Amino acid sequence: MATERFDFRSADGHRLSGRLDLPATAPRAFALFAHCFTCTKQSIAAVRIARALTQRGIGVLRFDFTGLGESEGDFADSTFSGNVRDLVAAAGEMTAKGMAPRLLIGHSLGGAAVLAGAADIDSVAAVAVIGAPFDVKHVTLQFGDHLPDLLEKGEAEVDLGGRPFNMRRAFIDDLERHDQKSRIANLKRALLVLHSPADQTVGADNAGAIFQAARHPKSFVSLDNADHLLTRPSDASYAADVIAAWASRYLASDLDWAGELSENRVVVEETGGGRYQVAVKTGHAQFLADEPREVGGLGSGPTPHQLLAAGLGACTTMTLRMYAERKGWPVAHIRTVVEHAREAGDMAQPDLFTRAVTLTGDLDAEQRARLIEIAGKCPVHKTLTAGARIATVAAEGV
């Protein structure tokens, strides 16, 4: 798993700190993770779930809500509505950078946030919540004996998970504004509810209420005897594996490999990764093409002109091998290097492809000269020098 810094601005103008976890290969989809109340992007659940998803080819953004972790802002000024705005801002930044999230994952109050924010993120196809409360006012139970002071004085220091936090009444007043039951009923996305019957912080009855309010497709998975924060690595890993397997059904797209194509057909489609990354599908293979980072790409594959040069180089090398075998000549190895150049500012001047062929083997001068001559006979060479006709039509699908 490779991790990149991914900071962005909240709707309120604060810099929010994020980490983008990427798989070793090109991401097939992207997910956005919302951490639990007073947690951070470095929580056990956040890190382990991101790791498991990257192993299945899904990129994940996890970030700190306003006033937490490395994000700017005062936590005392935060509200649940603000958390939802932070989530939508994160999705907007991902979308702007060509990584629109297809999956939302929320832990505890972060689960309530993704249920609330999904309607404002068009790209989302599936939502997974872990230990989430059905009613966001449930969070006030964590204030314990400090709640009366908070309501009376308008501000108080409360103990949350063994750490002191300054809270204001505005946080509680904001909770009254949210009708989660209606939001869940109108989610219009696939929903996965994960909850532990042993959860002492958010009771399992909350999972039942969420599941009952939701419409299909919906799924429920028990996390057995896991604690609320998934502090045991095995519990976090299990939840991650379940989410990854479940989500694969809803993250599938037309980019997924669906069998062989005819030999004379190539399909090129955007992957959603970066601004320019595309998946190239041929009769028996699939690979990526892209633009360099310096022009806004991810640098994850050859550029279009590099592919064109590669086609010439591959065709040259194969043609020489076929000819050498037919002649019975002792060619041990063939290497073709192709460089492409374009005359700056002169569109009338044809592009130049310079081809350097290295032949290894016990060949005499005449044989080497003949093979260099044969290089000009390769089909791609002929196509490039003769020119080609190109017909472009509007089509449905592939």
Image (cartoon, rainbow, N blue to C red):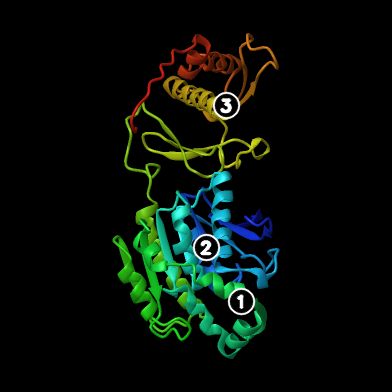
The answer to whether the residue labelled 3 contacts the one labelled 2, judged by CB atoms less than 8 Å apart, is no
* Element assignment for label 1: helix
* Residue sitting farthest toward the bottom: 145
Q: Which residue is mark 1?
A: 169
Label 3 vs label 1: CA separation?
Answer: 60 Å
Indicate the quadrant containing the N terminus: top left, top right, bottom left or bottom right: bottom right
Check disc 2 and report its element: helix, strand or loop.
strand
Q: Amino acid at mark 2?
A: Phe
Kindly report which numbered mark, 1 or 2, lies closer to the viewer in this rendering: 1
Q: Which mark is residue 33?
A: 2
Which residue occupies 33% across, 30% down?
Answer: 396
Mark 2 or mark 3, which is nearer the start of the sequence?
A: 2
Residues packed near mark 3 inside 10 Å, few (<14), some (14 to 19) or many (20 plus)? few
Q: Give amino acid for label 1.
A: Arg
Other residues around mark 1 within 10 Å, as few (<14) / some (14–19) / many (≥20)? some
Residue lying at the far left in this picture: please name it.
Answer: 216
In this view of the protein, which residue sits in the foreground, 122 or 219? 122
Q: Quadrant of residue 333?
A: top right
Q: Earlier in the sequence, mark 3 or mark 1?
A: 1
Expressed as whole percent of the image width and height from the top left, the position of residue 330 reads 51, 26
Q: Does residue 131 sit above or below 246 in this rendering?
A: below
SS class, disc 3: helix
Q: Earlier in the sequence, mark 1 or mark 2?
A: 2
Mark 2 closeness class: few <14, some 14–19, many ≥20 residues within 10 Å: many
Task: Determine whether 373 is above or below 204 in the image.
Answer: above
Q: Residue at x 45, y 81 (%)?
A: 202
Q: Is residue 358 visible?
A: yes
Q: Which of the numbered marks, if any, corresponds to residue 305?
A: 3
Residue 230 visible: no
Please provide percent x and percent y for residue 266. 40, 30
Q: In the shown orientation, is residue 356 left or right of residue 54? A: right
